[in-house]
Amino acid sequence: MDARSPATLAVHPPEPSGVAGGGLCAPVYRSTAYDGAGEPGYSRLSNPGVDAVAAGVAELEGAEAGLLFSSGTAATTAVLLALVPAGGTLVAAREVCADTAHLLDHELSRLGRAVRSVPVEDLDAWRRALAAGASLALVESLSNPGLRVADVAAVSEIARSAGAVTAVDSTLATPVNLRPLEHGAGLVLHSASKYLNGHSDVIAGAVCGPGSLVARVRRVQWATGSCLDPGAAALLGRGMRTLHLRMQAHNRNGLLVARFLQGHPEVDSVRHPLLESHPDAAVARTLLRGGSGMVLLRPGGGAERARRLVGALRLVRAAPTLGGLETLAFLPGDDGLRLSVGVEDPDDIVADLDRALTSTAAHRPRRREAIA
């Protein structure tokens, strides 16, 4: 493993194998086939540029090997199929993103896999579910959209004692704020479309971990054809070179915005992992080096007020994604509002939120409470 700091690793990513150094930017290998060190290569199976960016993700996570996929969902699917055999069982946290929940609830059973869901914070439930027989535990280090913080070290230890591997989707935390492998996880997953890319212009996924586990996932990738396009990989690699700088701004702005919203009279509740009111605040303080740019708020007036609030925002844009430079708002399906706080001047973000909250005021008494 490289002993250099994550900031240095981000700025100086690995170069494609077999290529002479000297270029400040790595070439993009768009050919479907090529002569790789005397052996014919096919880009669906391996591409020098894609492989170099995958190695860069692995370096940032402190992993031995990495793979890139056509999307985060493709990466998750490959891990599940590789590590949960037909007839086998997966134990997953209930608090996962909507696409993963659909995959677990509707697709895995058709492929002959069983799923047991447990509350992310209930370690006794993890013990019971894993002890009953399972090959994989799946958690999101910081869940989307509920922003629950998984005790990665505890879940990984419980899984290891039961003979299972832990896979951690660390999309929202990023390797800047958490490296799950250092806490006992077996694999790390990312929707690389989000913070790793950071520019809202790439759909990609990533898996990192020990070479033996990644090799099993690679075989599923080859069989399903879920490789990443070389051009998309190049954009991802470019974005990753500023990950450490962007995350400093996301971490700072996210907490500033959360604290502002926590004291606003038009907000009933707010969630950010580094607020004392967060249900997993103790775990977050121990586990995370930063809180990311994600904030979940519930304005007074319920779902209708949340919709009006999104419509009243001017700087903050509405979009069903996160992790880009710009601040984004999304309605995740209840009366809450998910903010992906960007890297703009925080005073401008706060001013836009304050104006929108004030202009859509419900003018009625409200009860402040924690988001369940």
Image: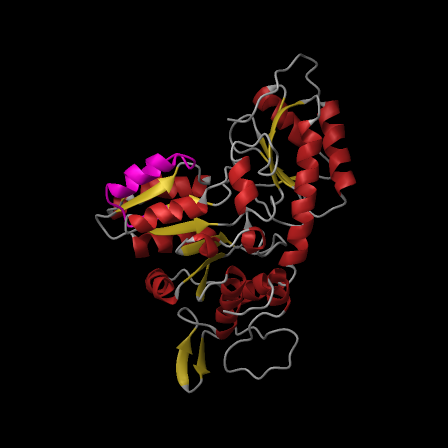
Q: Residue 114: where, in percent of width, then height?
A: 26, 42
In the drawing, does residue 105 fall left or right of residue 281? Answer: left
Q: Is residue 160 above or below residue 268?
A: below
Q: Residue 155: where, in percent of width, then height?
A: 39, 44
Along the line of sight, the residue nearer the viewer: 292 or 359: 292
| The quarter of the displayed image where residue 240 is located | bottom right
Q: Is residue 71 visible?
A: no
Give the extent of the magenta segment.
116-137
Queried whether the magenta region covers residue 253, the answer comes back as no
Q: Residue 191: where, in percent of width, then height?
A: 50, 52
| The quarter of the displayed image where residue 104 is located | top left
Queried whether the magenta region covers residue 119, the answer comes back as yes
Q: Residue at x 64, y 52 (%)?
A: 247
In the drawing, does residue 47 fall left or right of residue 6? Answer: left
Q: Is residue 35 above or below residue 176?
A: below
Q: Residue 34: where, in percent of width, then height?
A: 45, 80
Along the line of sight, the residue nearer the viewer: 148 or 24: 148
Please say which color scheme the image uses. Answer: secondary structure
Q: Residue at x 26, y 42 (%)?
A: 131
